[in-house]
Image (cartoon, grey):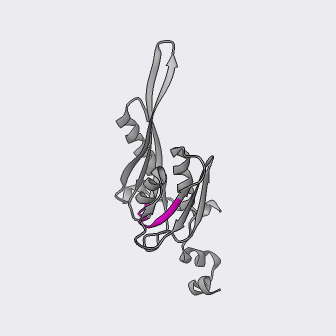
């Protein structure tokens, strides 16, 4: 898929909710002993089709989370949502992490694990079937999920891209 599908969004115009996906303590061993620092992966979204992720690193947990939120607000993408689910099946891949996202009927809920669940719920998707197929590393799973969501296109966008009527997209 082309990167032209990805629609960047300005964070100043919307109310965003943040979710902490993962926090890790990292140790740097020096002559004087171990120096600990923290890295936090944070997902932000307005639960209405806009989602982004960020990574923050600092000496303290709260500072790392704050940095992660600021970074996430710089990486927002718009996701097409139709009746609470995704428009079509989509694979996403980043490094060793690969994910599969499928649309589901109303009432199914978000059937996804850990890092994927945080991204999908922050985007505002209420009914979806999702599976992490590769690495379980939360960094790669979050990035693969964002990749899959960013490459989704609704029927209206496809019709506009092809320069045809919306009816022709469905009926050929």
> Measured from the top left, where is residue 21 in percent x and y?
43, 46
Q: Which residue is drawn at 45% across and 50% down?
A: 114
Find the residue positioned furthest to the top: 31
Q: How many labels does the image show?
A: 0
Location of residue 88 with respect to 111 vertically, above or below: below
Q: Examine the image and state in which quarter residue 83 appears.
A: bottom left
Residue 155: x and y in percent read 55, 77
Residue 80 image point, x, y percent = 49, 68
- Is 60 left or right of 5, judged from the image as shown? left
Residue depicted at x 45% and y 59%: 120
Instruction: Say if residue 51 shows up in the picture.
Output: yes
Q: Which quadrant does the C terminus fall into?
A: bottom right
Q: Is 5 placed left or right of 14 in the picture?
A: right
Front-most of residues 21 and 130: 130
Position of 85 relative to 25 (above/below):
below
Q: Residue 75: x percent and y percent? A: 49, 52
Q: Does the magenta run of residues contain 45?
A: no
Q: In this view, does 90 lie to the left or right of 118?
A: right
Q: In which quarter of the image is the N terminus?
A: bottom right
Stretch of the chain drawn in magenta: 123-130
Q: Which residue is at 50% across, 68% downward?
A: 86
Q: Can residue 74 be seen in this view?
A: no
- Of 18 and 24, the residue lying toward us: 24
């Amino acid at each position: 898929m082309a990167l032209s599908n990805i629609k960047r969004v300005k964070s100043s115009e919307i109310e965003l909710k943040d979710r902490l996906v993962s926090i890790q303590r990292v140790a740097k061993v020096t002559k004087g002993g171990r120096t600990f620092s923290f890295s936090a992966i944070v997902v932000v979204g307005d639960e209405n089709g806009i989602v982004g992720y960020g990574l923050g690193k600092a000496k303290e947990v709260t500072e790392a989370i704050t940095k992660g939120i600021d970074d996430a607000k710089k990486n927002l993408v718009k996701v097409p949502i139709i009746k609470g689910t995704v428009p079509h099946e989509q694979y996403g891949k980043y490094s060793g992490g690969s994910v599969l996202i499928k649309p589901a009927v109303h009432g199914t809920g978000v059937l996804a694990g850990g890092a994927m669940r945080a991204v999908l719920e922050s985007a505002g998707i209420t009914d979806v079937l999702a599976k992490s197929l590769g690495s379980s590393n939360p960094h790669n799973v979050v990035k693969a999920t964002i990749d899959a969501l960013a490459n989704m296109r609704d029927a209206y966008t496809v019709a506009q891209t092809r320069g045809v009527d919306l009816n022709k997209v469905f009926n050929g």
